[in-house]
Amino acid sequence: MSKIAVVFWSGTGNTEAMADAVAEGAKNAGAEVELLPVSAASADVVGSDALLFGCPAMGSEELEESEFEPVFNECEPKLNGKKIALFGSYGWGDGEWMRTWEETCNSAGAVLTAESVICNDAPDDEATANCNALGAALAG
């Protein structure tokens, strides 16, 4: 059974709802899942078989910088060869923060094993289904 960590930050609850759907998809696919708000996470999560990181777009399309970014930055040097996936919500823009984040992960040598899931504001049924599929993809 693969062990998956789902690490997220959510200000309004939208990315948390996405994290719940990602975790549910991974559990339904047979993975052991640890769902962690970033405040409860550390770089130790890199010991999991796969990692899912969730963070909404903030400011001028960037990661949340007071809680999420420091933990992600601790993990980043350890992501080489790791199976990961990204998800998050946004309220404006076109998803630039996600493209920048994917580039950062690729530069670190991470293996983005599924297409990132983004949604505008609260996840609708399609976004929730995409989050379930994202979790399942990393469980396999």
Image (cartoon, helix red, strand yellow):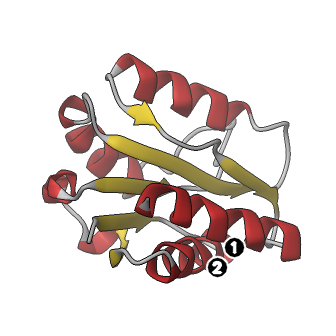
Q: Determine the CA span between mark 1 and mark 2.
A: 5 Å
Count of numbered tags: 2
- Where disc 1 sits, the SS reads helix
Q: Is residue 41 left or right of 36 when viewed as pictured?
A: left
Image position, residue 114 (x, y; %): 57, 44
Q: Residues within 10 Å of mark 1 (few under 14, many from 20)?
A: many
Q: Residue 137, relative to residue 99: is it above or below?
A: below
| Residue closest to the eye, 125 or 40 | 125
Which quadrant of the view contains residue 138? bottom left
Q: Residue 122, can we see it? A: yes
Residue name at image x 64 percent, y 41 percent: 115
Image position, residue 59 (x, y; %): 66, 43
Label 1 sits on residue: 14
Q: Residue 36, relative to residue 131: is it above or below?
A: below
Identity, as a three-letter code, of the amino acid under mark 2: Ala
Location of the N terminus (image quadrant): bottom left
Image position, residue 25 (x, y; %): 56, 75
| Residue closest to the eye, 87 or 72 | 87
Location of the C terminus (image quadrant): bottom left
Image position, residue 110 (x, y; %): 35, 31
Residue name at image x 76 percent, y 71 percent: 129
| Residue closest to the eye, 52 or 133 | 133
Residue name at image x 54 percent, y 65 percent: 136
Mark linked to residue 4? none
Q: Is residue 100 left or right of 26 when viewed as pictured?
A: right
Q: Of the residues tagged 1 and 2, which is closer to the observer?
A: 2
Q: Is residue 103 left or right of 60 when viewed as pictured?
A: left
Which quadrant of the view contains residue 98? top right
Label 2 sits on residue: 17
Could you tell me if the residues under marks 1 and 2 are in contact, i.e. CB atoms within 8 Å? Answer: yes
Identity, as a three-letter code, of the amino acid under mark 1: Asn
